[in-house]
Image (tube, rainbow, N blue to C red):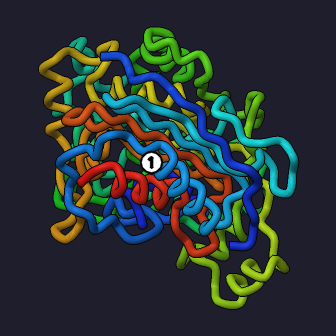
């Protein structure tokens, strides 16, 4: 598994491990996050081909949706998975499988997971709050804060947020991937991550194209710390987690490999270096995985510091739902109305033939605003549709699947197709 795959962004993408009993629980209607580096928010699989949904199917069929969730998770060989849905018609959570492969503890809606690139939305929001306060401007050159950035005098803060800086992605390097395979517990400092990126030539002129690069978000995290004069974890707590009441959400220190209880363990196939060219297992290993003779690796307590402000966050279903709703403009405001509108409008198509769009630390996936995330062992999707007031969060704990796809992304796509007509 490549390190780059773990922090990708997917657009509702379209097995050997059997799932144990799955459960669904009713909920109330809602009150009024080795990895590959895609050139589009298509993550590790094909982007969903369905047209942007227009009308919510009513009444809400919880049994049918739960069946779709369960069967898709099982098809993808997931040890465990969980989902949360909120609509004006009501909502529910559902879980499948167990927290460990072959274990007996069922997945719960309260389990903590690593949320990967959903963390980017935290970093982007903090930067925009600093913009709102006049402490930084979207048009500021990166060199104003980091003179060491290659071509930094021509790269703006906005281009970092939009993934249009042209800076190489450090998670594409053999150095990082081999390092993660050799020493999963290694502590990576943010400056080490940037050094790997800065040793590579830019991939294009600033603003000329889109390329998903974790280097952009690590830079933004360091700039936020520089402006605020405090650790990023404290910034996130003070500005985001505290005001929104996200008591089960955290950003670990770079030497912290713990995952709070209750938790779902995470698993990944093969090695980071082995999947540099493709996240899908090669035919021989895929056949062995399907036969049950090749087993995934437990990566639950691997150190996520290599992802830092681009992907090291921890959260739960409910906290992710609250967060993505706020990200989409519902509930406690994170930005003033004008800047919030501008953020949603900032999402630009990532390619002429791709349905997804990316903006200021936020993705637009069909009619949903949010993000997806993947670290070795975990894949998650969070999205909020302001037009229909629908919130969907999904996670799974064997990522990517043996076929190279993000399991939570595939499940989310199947659910969205059933929710809209």
Q: In which quarter of the view is residue 187 placed?
A: top right
Residue drawn at (87%, 47%) of the image: 104
- Above or below residue 360? Residue 129 is above
Which residue occupies the foreground of this view, 235 or 296?
296
Please name the residue shown 68% across and 73% down the image: 15
Q: Residue at x 75, y 64 (%)?
A: 18
Quarter in which the N terminus is drawn:
bottom right
> Is residue 56 depicted above or below 318 in this figure?
below
Q: Residues within 10 Å of mark 1 (few under 14, many from 20)?
A: many
Query: Where residue 70 sits in the image (x, y, percent)?
Result: 59, 55
The reply to whether residue 186 is in sight is: no
Q: Quadrant of residue 351?
A: bottom left
Task: Report the side of 386 relative to 34 (left or right).
Answer: left
- When the figure is inspected, residue 13 is found, relative to residue 404, above or below; the finding is above
Q: Residue furthest bottom?
A: 284
The quadrant the C terminus occupies is bottom left
Dot 1: what SS?
strand
Q: Please tell me which residue lies in front, 205 or 216.
A: 216
Residue placed under numbered mark 1 in the picture: 372
């Amino acid at each position: 598994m490549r390190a780059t795959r773990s922090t990708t962004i997917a657009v509702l993408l379209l097995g050997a491990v059997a799932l144990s009993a799955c459960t669904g629980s009713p909920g109330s209607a809602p009150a009024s996050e080795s990895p590959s580096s895609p050139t589009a928010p298509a993550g590790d699989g094909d982007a969903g081909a369905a047209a942007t949904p227009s009308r919510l199917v009513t009444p809400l069929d919880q049994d049918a949706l739960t069946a779709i969730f369960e069967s898709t998770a099982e098809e993808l060989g997931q040890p465990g998975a969980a989902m949360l849905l909120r609509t004006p018609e009501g909502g529910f959570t559902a879980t499948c499988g167990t927290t460990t492969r072959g274990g007996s503890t069922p997945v719960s809606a309260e389990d903590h997971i690593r949320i990967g690139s959903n963390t980017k939305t935290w970093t982007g929001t903090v930067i925009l709050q600093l913009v709102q306060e006049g402490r930084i401007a979207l048009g500021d050159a990166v060199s104003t804060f980091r003179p060491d950035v290659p071509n930094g005098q021509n790269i703006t803060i906005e281009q970092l947020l939009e993934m249009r800086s042209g800076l190489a992605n450090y998670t594409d390097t053999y150095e990082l991937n081999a390092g993660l395979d050799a020493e999963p517990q290694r502590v990576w400092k943010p400056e080490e991550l940037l050094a790997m990126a800065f040793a590579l030539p830019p991939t294009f002129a600033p603003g000329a194209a889109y390329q998903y690069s974790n280097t952009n978000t690590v830079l933004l995290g360091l700039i936020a710390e520089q402006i605020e004069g405090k650790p990023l974890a404290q910034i996130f707590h003070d500005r985001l987690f505290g005001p929104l009441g996200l008591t089960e959400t955290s950003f670990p220190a770079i030497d912290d490999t713990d995952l709070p209880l209750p938790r779902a363990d995470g698993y990944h196939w093969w090695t980071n270096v082995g999947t540099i060219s493709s996240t899908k297992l090669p035919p021989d290993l895929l056949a062995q995985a399907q036969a049950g003779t090749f087993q995934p690796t437990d990566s639950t307590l691997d150190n996520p510091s290599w992802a830092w402000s681009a992907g090291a966050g921890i959260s739960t279903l409910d906290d992710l739902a609250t967060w993505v709703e706020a990200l989409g403009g519902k509930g406690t405001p994170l930005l003033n109305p004008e800047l919030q509108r501008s953020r949603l409008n900032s999402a630009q198509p990532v390619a002429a033939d791709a349905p997804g769009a990316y903006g200021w630390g936020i993705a637009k996936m069909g009619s949903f605003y949010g993000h997806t995330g993947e670290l070795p062992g975990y894949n998650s999707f969070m999205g909020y549709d302001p037009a229909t007031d629908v919130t969907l969060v999904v996670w799974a704990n064997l990522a990517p699947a043996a076929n190279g796809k993000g399991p939570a992304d595939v499940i989310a796509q199947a659910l969205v197709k059933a929710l809209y007509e």
